[in-house]
Image (cartoon, helix red, strand yellow):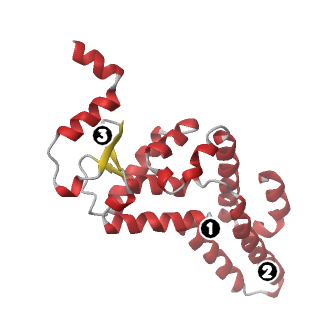
Amino acid sequence: MIAELLYKWFPKQFNQLVWDATYKPDKMRGLKFAFVCEGHRFYVFDSLFEMPLERLGRAQDFVMQLQRMVSDQELTRFLDSMESALFESTNAEKLKSISRIGFLIGEMKERKKILIHPEIMMELASCMLVREDQDPADWNDEFEQKKVEMFRRNYKGKGLYDFFVSGGLKQFFPNLDSFEQDWETYLEMSQSRLKALEELMKSPRSVGSSTTKTKSTVN
């Protein structure tokens, strides 16, 4: 009874004690307990130096995406849209095509003004977090995507900031603490801009004519 009450009051500390006391092969060394999500225990690397090389490489790739504030998927969509605009066949569409390319280039430059990119940060946190039934040395895109979807279901708003902290993102961004007070404002601004671009990319012919409206709405 007492043990149950103590676990209820201090679940994280108990899980960490159990993890520390449990035999772990060398591949699981360097991990510390982070949290429980949907019945699964997750652990995070206490130091980047403890990460397997492939997982560290993936993490570095996500950091590079954050530096430009454009994910690999978004970059592909940007380039595909610009390429299609270049090959518009009719003279009547040439001006609209040039306008569309100009808008997309401008949008990529504007991404530098976004303070956070929650989707890329989610991918990075998932990379840092290891599920109890996962081999950290193995990288499986499908398994990692399932983790991301699980995290999306469970962490939103202010809870998303706490998730990123638990997911070890401070190791990459030491100034993450400065985002806490106005986190929801930064998040709303970022999501608004990402959503606006997503809607425009669904109907690329409207991009050129919607540039002014979009910028005034998002900024």
Query: Alpha carbon of mark 1 to alpha carbon of mark 3: how far?
Result: 33 Å
Q: Amino acid at mark 3?
A: His
Q: Which mark is residue 68?
A: 1
Res 202 quadrant in image: bottom right
Q: Any mark on residue 40, and which?
A: 3
Image point 85% across, 61% down: which residue?
212
Instruction: Kindly report the distance in space between the C-alpha atoms of the residues bearing marks 1 and 2.
Output: 23 Å
**Disc 1 to disc 2: CB gap under 8 Å:** no
Query: Which disc is residue 200 wearing?
Result: none
Residue 46 position within the rendered picture, expressed as x and y whole percent measured from the top left: 36, 50
- Give percent across and percent down for residue 70: 60, 65
Height in image: 72 above or below 29?
below
Query: Does residue 1 sit above or below 118 in this rendering?
Result: above
Numbered-mark total: 3
Task: From the image, state whether disc 2 or disc 3 is nearer to you.
Answer: 3
Looking at the image, the residue that sits furthest to the top is 1
**Left or right of residue 20, residue 106 in this image:** right
Instruction: Tell me, for residue 98, which label it has, or none.
Output: 2
Instruction: Point out the tag, 1 or 2, that comes first from the N-terminus.
Output: 1
Q: Is disc 3 surrounded by few (<14), some (14 to 19) or many (20+) residues within 10 Å? A: few
Residue type, mark 1 in image: Arg
Which three-letter amino acid code belongs to the residue tagged 2? Ile
The first of marks 2 and 3 along the sequence is 3
